[in-house]
C-alpha cells in the first residue's frame, strides 16, 4: 500500500544513459540478464554488446555431460548451464568460447556456454595418432586454433592450425622434435617451447621458417609447469615451480618473466615482479586480463587453483606478484575447472 501523498514511480521511464550506467556496474552476468528482463524499455536501452567485462567464472565439466557447472567467486554462486550436446573435453577458453575436444568421428567446434552458440571447425584432414590443442583470439578478433599432432609412427610431431573464416586446416612445413611444452600465438608467429631444453622458437605462421630463438628462463626444469601470455604486445612467460600436473597445497612459487625482444638477434626472458595493471588466471592454460576492465580483479596478481592430494576438493588462491603474499579465496569446488570469461555476444564465423 502506498503512503498518502507519495507518487507512483514509473521505473521504465528512466533515462537511457542512467540505465546504461546501472547495467555497466552490475557485477554478474546473471544480474545483467535479469536487469534486461524487467521491461522492454530496459532491454532496448542495454543491448548485449554493452555488457561490461566480468570477473572470470570457473567452468567445470564432466565428460559426456550436457550440463556445465559455472562457479562465480564474486557472488559465491553456482550456475548450471545446459549445453546443446554432450561435450567430450574442453581445451581452454578464449573470447567467451571454449574449444571442445573431439574424436575422429566427431567434428570440432567452439562453444559459448552462455548462449549455446557454436562455431564449427572443418574436419581435420591429416592423419594423426595423438593431438593437443591451443586456442587464442588474434588481433583481428578472430580465433586461431592450433593442433600439435603425432603421426601413427609416434616419431614425427607436426603442427596444424585453423583461423576463423578458413575452410580448411593448414599444416606448417615443420617437424617438431617432440611434443612441445607450450605453444603461443602472436602477430602471425607461433612461439614453441621445447620440452627438453626450455628453448623457445619463434616460427613464421605462413612459411614455417624460424624467425629467432629465445634461450630458456633461468632454473629451467622439465618438471615445472610452463605458460605464456600476451597483453598489449608484451609477452610473458609464467613458470610454476612444482612437479606434477596439478598445483598442490605446497607449490606456490610462481615466477614471471617478460620477453625482451629489443636486443637484435638475441631476445631473452627477464624476470619481473610487476605485470602492471594486469592479472593472470592459470589452469591448464592461462588468461591475462586488464584489471581496470574487469569488476573485482586485483592488479599484478595471479589467480590459481590448489587441490587436495586426492583431488576431492579444489580451492582458489590469489598471489601478489610483487610481494609473493598468497590469499585464499572463499570458494571451493569439488572438480577441476577452467577460468572462463562470461560473454553473451556471438562471434560471426565469417
Image: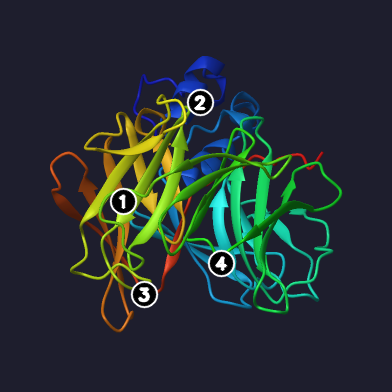
Q: Secondary structure at mark 2?
A: helix
Tag on residue 334? Answer: 3
Image quarter in which the C terminus is found:
top right
In this rendering, position of residue 229 left or right of residue 67: left
Residue 41 is drawn in which quadrant?
A: top right
Image height of 266 relative to 228, above or below = above
In this view, the residue in front, 186 or 1, is 186
Which residue has dot 2 on it? 11
Q: Earlier in the sequence, mark 3 or mark 4?
A: 4
Q: Nearer the viewer, mark 1 or mark 3?
A: 1
Q: Position of residue 343 (x, y in %)?
A: 57, 43
The mark lying in front, picked from 2 and 1, is 1
Give the Cα separation between the discs numbered 2 and 1.
39 Å
Please report the residue visible at 42 percent of the width from the left and 41 percent of the height from the top: 288
Residue designated by label 4: 178
Disc sitting over residue 303 in the figure:
1
152 left or right of 43 in image: right
CA gap, disc 4 to disc 1? 30 Å
Packing grade of label 3 (10 A; few <14, some 14-19, many >=20) is: few
Sequence-first tag of 2 and 3: 2
Image side of residue 17 versus residue 256, left or right? right
For this orientation, the residue located farthest to the front is 265
Q: In the picture, residue 45 is in which quadrant?
A: top right
Q: Is residue 54 visible?
A: no
Residue 348 position within the rendered picture, expressed as x and y whole percent measured from the top left: 76, 39
Query: What's the distance in space between the residues labelled 2 and 3, CA to CA?
Result: 42 Å
Amino acid at each position: 500500500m502506498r503512503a498518502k501523498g507519495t507518487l507512483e514511480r514509473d521505473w521504465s521511464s528512466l533515462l537511457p544513459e542512467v540505465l546504461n550506467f546501472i547495467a555497466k556496474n552490475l557485477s554478474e552476468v546473471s544480474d545483467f540478464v535479469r536487469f534486461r528482463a524487467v521491461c522492454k524499455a530496459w532491454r532496448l536501452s542495454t543491448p548485449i554488446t554493452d555488457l561490461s567485462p566480468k570477473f572470470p567464472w570457473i567452468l567445470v565439466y564432466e565428460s559426456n555431460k550436457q550440463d556445465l557447472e559455472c562457479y562465480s567467486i564474486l557472488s559465491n554462486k553456482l550456475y548450471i548451464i545446459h549445453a546443446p550436446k554432450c561435450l567430450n573435453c574442453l581445451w581452454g577458453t578464449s573470447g567467451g568460447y571454449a574449444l571442445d575436444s573431439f574424436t575422429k568421428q566427431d567434428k570440432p567446434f567452439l562453444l559459448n556456454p552462455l548462449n549455446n552458440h557454436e562455431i564449427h571447425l572443418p574436419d581435420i584432414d591429416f592423419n594423426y595418432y595423438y593431438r593437443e590443442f591451443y586456442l587464442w583470439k588474434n588481433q583481428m578478433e578472430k580465433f586461431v586454433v592450433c593442433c600439435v599432432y603425432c603421426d601413427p609412427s609416434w616419431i614425427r610431431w607436426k603442427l596444424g592450425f585453423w583461423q576463423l573464416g578458413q575452410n580448411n586446416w593448414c599444416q606448417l612445413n615443420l617437424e617438431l622434435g617432440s611434443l612441445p611444452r607450450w605453444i603461443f600465438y602472436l602477430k602471425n608467429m607461433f612461439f614453441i617451447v621445447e620440452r627438453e631444453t626450455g628453448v623457445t622458437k619463434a616460427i613464421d605462421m605462413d612459411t614455417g621458417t624460424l624467425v629467432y630463438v629465445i634461450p630458456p628462463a633461468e632454473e629451467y626444469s622439465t618438471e615445472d609447469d610452463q605458460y605464456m601470455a600476451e597483453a598489449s604486445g608484451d609477452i610473458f612467460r609464467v613458470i610454476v615451480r612444482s612437479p606434477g600436473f596439478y598445483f598442490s597445497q605446497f607449490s606456490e612459487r610462481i615466477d614471471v618473466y617478460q620477453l625482451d625482444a629489443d636486443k637484435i638477434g638475441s631476445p631473452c626472458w627477464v624476470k619481473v615482479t610487476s605485470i602492471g595493471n594486469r592479472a593472470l588466471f592459470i589452469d591448464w592454460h592461462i588468461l591475462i586480463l586488464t584489471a581496470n576492465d574487469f569488476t573485482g580483479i586485483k592488479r599484478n596478481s595471479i589467480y590459481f587453483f590448489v587441490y587436495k592430494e586426492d583431488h576431492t576438493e579444489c580451492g582458489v588462491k590469489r598471489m601478489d606478484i610483487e610481494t609473493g603474499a598468497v590469499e585464499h579465496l572463499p570458494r571451493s569446488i569439488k572438480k577441476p575447472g577452467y577460468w572462463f570469461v562470461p560473454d553473451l555476444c556471438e562471434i560471426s564465423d565469417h
